[in-house]
Image: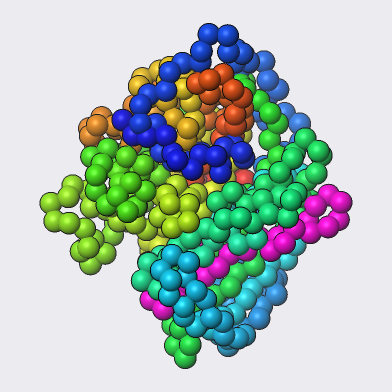
């Protein structure tokens, strides 16, 4: 078995999963622990006002709506932003290599977006191309319900490769009322009533001074949410019976390989899941991209995905936006991080041919057939049986053949969508609240575009 993530405290504060399962299966809740609330006792998942909002800037009109300093929009199937005339030059000391280098830069700041409901959490996503000698920074600033603003928080220093900078989140960012936990900006005390009522994103594109290469950003945005505390969720009616043919990759066959990337395969549920969906859409790394992997290693593309999603500050491969950005490094693919309301949303996507990657945490015994407990784990939802049970490619398997699982609908629904749960000691901790990754092609079918729009993603 794999292990409980060492960095759990940074995300469990916000109800986020870390993407690695425990070293030993966690025991069930101890005698005397408070019982879980009946999942059917909660309010309907889609009742009342919306609590999840997605806003992504992707079109030529979107790029023209922002404030540009040294960048310009470019047309094409995927309109994007490129560095045109540098706004200046900055020296940056990479905290993970110790090297200092100079970089030309230019910026784009989004218009202020007001979500459908004030938020306690914001999770950004971006899709970009960063040729050698280039990288991007993504920042986020929210406006509180009292009219004041957060600082500009760094949500990622990102490049698809690791030759120029080390891909990284930034720890220690807080103004006392909100904080960044790896990839999530959250209000520190939601019970106070404080919320973020709007936000802006800022992109900074960097390149080697005097060079002509430039990053290209095709998509940037965020998912905002304010989910109610819930130990259980109501049942969503079963409607779809379909199974998608998604490649199967076990994380566990990579145990001991490349421990510099989050201790090796035992913690690679997120990149293994991401690689499954990348290949479902017909994309793969090139032989040149895999040349660094030791000959004889099975499924070297999973090693490549782990290296390409690794966050050098978080020291893990489970950074959610980094996984979405990795998918978009493949020709014609795009990816976002969002939250879904129910299994009905998941069925809508699967029915149109779009699998999803879900984040969940649970005790052993809460998900029949899993055989483990986890503080946070990623797997892919690829279909639904005639009884409505969830067909998942779960990378926590001894080999690729054992990756396909069928999980009981009500159990899966609950461990994925709840925002509160009990841990092995009976303490109340956070759940993941329906977080998922969605990857899909630019040339998606009209049915797939309608399905995405139906779950709030465009």
Residue 61 x/y as whole percent = 65, 70
Is residue 323 visible in the rendered image? The answer is no
**Which residue is found at the position 71% from the left and 45% from the top?**
187
**Which residue is found at the position 81% from the left and 39% from the top?**
193
Q: Is residue 95 found left or right of 308 in the rendered image?
A: right
Residue at the top extreme of this rendering: 31
Residue 433 x/y as whole percent = 59, 34
Q: Is residue 149 magenta?
A: yes
The residue lying toward the viewer, choosing from 345 and 20, is 20
Residue 127 x/y as whole percent = 50, 62
Question: The magenta stretch spans which residues?
Answer: 126-152
Q: Is residue 451 found left or right of 312 in the rendered image?
A: right
Q: Quadrant of the N terminus?
A: top left
Q: Is residue 186 found left or right of 129 in the rendered image?
A: right
Q: Is residue 255 magenta?
A: no
Residue at the right extreme of this rendering: 146
The residue lying toward the viewer, choosing from 381 and 36, is 36
**Which residue is found at the position 71% from the left and 50% from the top?**
178
């Amino acid at each position: 078995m794999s292990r409980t993530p060492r960095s759990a405290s940074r995300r469990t504060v916000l109800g986020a999963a870390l993407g690695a399962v425990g070293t030993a299966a966690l025991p069930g809740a101890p005698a005397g622990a408070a019982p879980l609330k009946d999942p059917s006792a909660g309010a309907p998942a889609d009742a009342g006002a919306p609590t999840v909002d997605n806003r992504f800037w992707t079109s030529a009109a979107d790029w023209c709506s922002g404030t540009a300093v040294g960048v310009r929009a470019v047309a094409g199937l995927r309109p994007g932003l490129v560095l045109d005339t540098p706004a200046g030059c900055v020296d940056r000391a990479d905290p993970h290599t110790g090297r200092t280098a100079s970089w030309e830069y230019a910026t784009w700041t989004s218009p202020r977006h007001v979500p459908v409901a004030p938020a306690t959490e914001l999770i950004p996503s971006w899709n970009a191309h960063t040729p050698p000698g280039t990288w991007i920074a993504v920042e986020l600033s929210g406006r509180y319900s009292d009219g004041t603003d957060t600082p500009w928080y760094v949500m990622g220093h990102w490049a698809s490769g690791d030759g120029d900078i080390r891909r990284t989140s930034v720890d220690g960012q807080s103004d006392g009322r909100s904080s960044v936990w790896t990839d999530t900006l959250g209000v520190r005390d939601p019970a106070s009533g404080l919320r973020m009522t709007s936000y802006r994103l800022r992109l900074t594109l960097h390149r080697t001074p005097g060079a002509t290469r430039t990053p290209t950003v095709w998509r940037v945005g965020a998912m905002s949410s304010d989910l109610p505390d819930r130990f259980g969720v109501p049942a969503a009616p079963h409607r779809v019976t379909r199974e998608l043919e998604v490649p199967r990759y076990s994380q566990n066959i990579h145990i001991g390989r490349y421990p510099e990337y989050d201790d090796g395969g035992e913690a690679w549920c997120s990149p293994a899941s991401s690689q499954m969906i990348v290949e479902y859409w017909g994309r793969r790394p090139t032989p040149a991209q895999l040349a660094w992997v030791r000959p004889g290693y099975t499924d070297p593309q999973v090693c490549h995905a782990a290296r390409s999603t690794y966050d050098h500050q978080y020291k893990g491969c489970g950074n959610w936006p980094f996984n979405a950005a990795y998918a978009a490094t493949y020709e014609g693919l795009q990816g976002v991080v969002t939250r879904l309301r129910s299994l009905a949303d998941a069925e809508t996507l699967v029915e149109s041919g779009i699998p999803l990657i879900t984040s969940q945490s649970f005790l052993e015994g809460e998900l029949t057939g899993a055989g483990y407990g986890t503080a946070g784990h990623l797997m892919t939802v690829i279909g639904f049986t005639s009884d409505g049970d969830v067909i998942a490619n779960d990378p926590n398997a001894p080999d690729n053949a054992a990756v396909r699982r069928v999980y009981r609908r009500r159990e899966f629904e609950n461990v994925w969508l709840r925002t509160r749960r009990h841990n092995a000691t009976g303490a109340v901790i956070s759940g993941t609240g329906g977080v998922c990754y969605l990857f899909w092609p630019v040339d998606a079918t009209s049915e797939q575009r309608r399905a995405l729009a139906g779950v709030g993603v465009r």
